[in-house]
Amino acid sequence: MVSVRTTKGLRAGAAFAAALGMAVLAPPAVQADEPADDQWGVPHETLDAQKVVVGSASTVQMPDGEWRTWAVLNQSPDALLVEIDPFAGEVLSSYPMPGVIGSWGTEVAPDGTVWSASHTAGRLYSLEYGATEVTRTERPMPGTSFIWELDVGADGNVYGGTFEGWTPEQPAPAYAFGYDPQAQEFQSYGPFEDADTYIRSTETVGDELYVGTGSTDPHLYRVDTASGAFESVPFPESLGTCQFVYGLEEVGTDLYVRFNNCGELKNVGYVYDTVAQEWREHVIPNYYGTVSQPTDDGDVYLVADHVLHRFDPVTGELEARDIGRLFVNKFLTIAPDPVTGDDTVIGLSVNGDMGQLNLETGESKYFVPEGMTGELGESVRASGMSPDGRYHVSVGFGGGLGIYDPAASAWEWFPELGQGESFAFLDGKAYIGVYPSARVYEYDPTQEWSETNARQVVDLRIEGQDRPFGLVAVEDKLAVGSVAGYGLRQGALTLVDPTDGSYTAYQPVEEHGVISLTYRDGVIYGGTTIYGGNGSTPIDDDGRVFAWDVEAEELLWETVAIAGEKGVGSLTFGDDGRLFGATVGHVFEIDPETGEVLREGEIDPVESTALRGRWHISDLSYDPSDEHLYLSTSSSVYRIEVETFADVTPEPTTGSKLRVAPDGTKYWVVGRTIYSGVVEEDVVTDPATAMVSLEESLQDHTASGAVAGPIAHQLAKALDQAQKHLDGDRVGPAVGAMERFVRHVDNPKLPDTLDADAAEDLRGQAVTILDLLEEVNDSAA
């Protein structure tokens, strides 16, 4: 079948459609959607996302007397455990960790066995001293998805804490555990309180295990490892309200505790005397949770404000020691230099930078160990299309910004950026919403990337926000839609001035996160999800769509898009002002004035419960160049006919993160390889050819019984007369015959049979032919 270009008159006949009980839709053109084989699904360059992300690390003296740093490099599909000589500054060996993408905790036992926790796999991984392959345990609990910090106790057991992400009923309480390597058995501790959904930190002091929890009502517990009995340790009186006990480190009989998200304080440290069972009075501001063993004079070294400090636990004195920026430091150790014997502080940052401070000479150095490389794997987290047609992506589990320029057929890669969740473009600049703390960064592509480009525009942690999935330009400002932090439900719509970072935050839908935004004529339209931050419990069943008046600062309406769908992940306008949205695999049209859902359709059967823990999956775009919708889920790409929501994808297409370029080219990714698609339609402007197509359609409908009775003959006769008049160059009579065809369709009589779908199809093609005949008349005049 050929495609006919539709030009006018598409909305006529609404009364007839309503009489038949049909939705009032524009009659569709007759479309082929048969592109050339080399136009759809064309692979291009693969993004080389090299970036070192150290998930966890530890430096210890091994049984042979050598000092080694053991670090887990987060990457997909398999993380790497690497052995580093910290004084030679080189990677000596690496060991794949099958089935795991990263680690939060690494500890080395006295016998030289290296133990690492795992993300998503929820297992312990170990490398015995002298072994060449990593082994793994079962999960501590059936629902364990994450294991966080680890510690090896004096009894030789490995202790840790969990997040139970694979438990069907969420949120689920977390457990602490001890693993006996000899018996190969787990002992669980807990659950403690229902609110303790995360155990982010564990540390042993003697035969007692200290456990730090979160995320809504955090606790610090002291656990007897033999009996499992536990008691809560009261927090310091001056602390206030926090979200997590995020890090624990033992120094002798003192316990250094990192509290996280304490009001305006991102991180704060206190020292707990486990013998006296009381808190020392000194506070460590912006403490990052890693501390060395004491020097001979009792001082320790720790990281505060991203800088190494000497800390006197007796006086509370903090002295900065500059060895380079230790951002999110993974450990601190004091070890003797093998050449000079001088005590040296060693630290390793999340980006693979190693810092060293010689305590005898005061000399310092900062370097990346030779052979330290990282490969982020195949997870593109978010995408955006700039007005100049460049495709932007952020890579998950480590961040980084990739920009594909179709004109150059090349990627640019900026690994410095964190994990992006959304993109917007304003005045030639790219804006990226970044997790955590719902930060927004501004990047000017006309300038070199630097410490000030990209620059942070805003941080919404103080508003309880964490994941900025919605981002859109609103005149000269930015609107940010976000999901709340751990344990919280209330998301936000925030209007930000990018020039100075000032903002106003709103809560348009109670106890919902905001995961998609679009803007038109003074109104922000948003899509929400019932899922808040991890560790929170939804109190609703349905995602919503809302309209927010920017000037009046008020909610115009909110509505359930599709009952039972847990979130509305994407919204887009057609060029005629019609508003479309997508949940995960469903699409819908909604009236932007009233919020009335006009119609819906299922494109992909994926369950919307997949949004839990992911929040945003689908992207929906409208392409004005071909008047179609384009949907991508986490694994598939679809082309959708606007009027019927029919799937008219040229062929089954794997991919995600689809965006439409200004020239109409569609771009998406499979892994980190970019693909493009262009649908070349045959456009028919000849009314005679269009009449042949209409004749074939009428014959098909008659054969199926959709058209029967006297009307079948009347329609065939009117069309035959129109064709004969046109063959004789009698355009006026041909128009009259086609108008008679339309009148028959609009006024069926007993005993006629005229199916609603057949009527819509036939009328649509007939109106298109009338438009084409009018063009013939105009050109002849």
Image (cartoon, grey):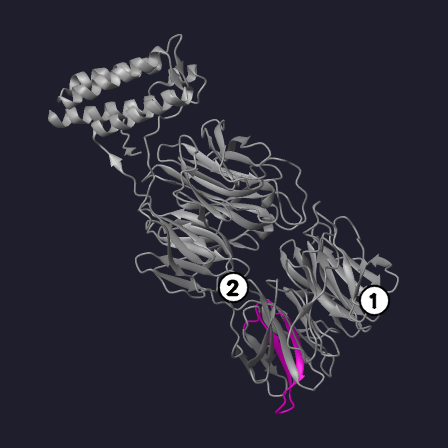
Give the x, y percent position of residue 373: 51, 72
Compared to residue 729, the image places residue 150 above or below, namely below
Q: Quadrant of residue 260?
A: bottom right
* Picture residue at 17% right of the left edge, 16% below the top: 733
- Could you say whether the residue bearing mark 2 is in a helix, strand or loop? loop
Q: In the rendered structure, which segment of residues is drawn in magenta? A: 325-349
Q: Is residue 69 left or right of residue 352?
A: right
Q: What residue type is labelled 1?
A: Glu
Residue named by callout 2: 376
Identify residue for label 1: 208
Residue furthest toward the top?
750
Does 461 appear in magenta?
no
Residue 342 lies in the magenta stretch: yes
Secondary structure of the residue carrying numbered label 1: strand
**Mark 1, other Cα within 10 Å: few <14 / some 14–19 / many ≥20:** some
Amino acid type, mark 2: Leu
Residue 655: give x, y in percent of width and height.
Answer: 46, 50
Task: Name the quarter where the C terminus is drawn.
Answer: top left
| Residue contact at pointers 2 and 1, CB within 8 angstroms | no
Q: Please state which of residues 478 and 175 is positioned toward the viewer in this rendering.
A: 175
Screen quadrant of the N terminus: top left
Question: Residue 289 got which mark?
Answer: none
Q: Establish if 243 lies above or below 64.
A: above
Q: Would residue 249 be seen by someone viewing this image from the given angle?
A: no
Residue 510 against residue 633 in the figure, above or below: above
| Eye-nearest disc, 2 or 1 | 2
| 291 left or right of 400 in image | right
- Judge the density around disc 2: few (<14), some (14-19), many (≥20) Cα neighbours within 10 Å: many
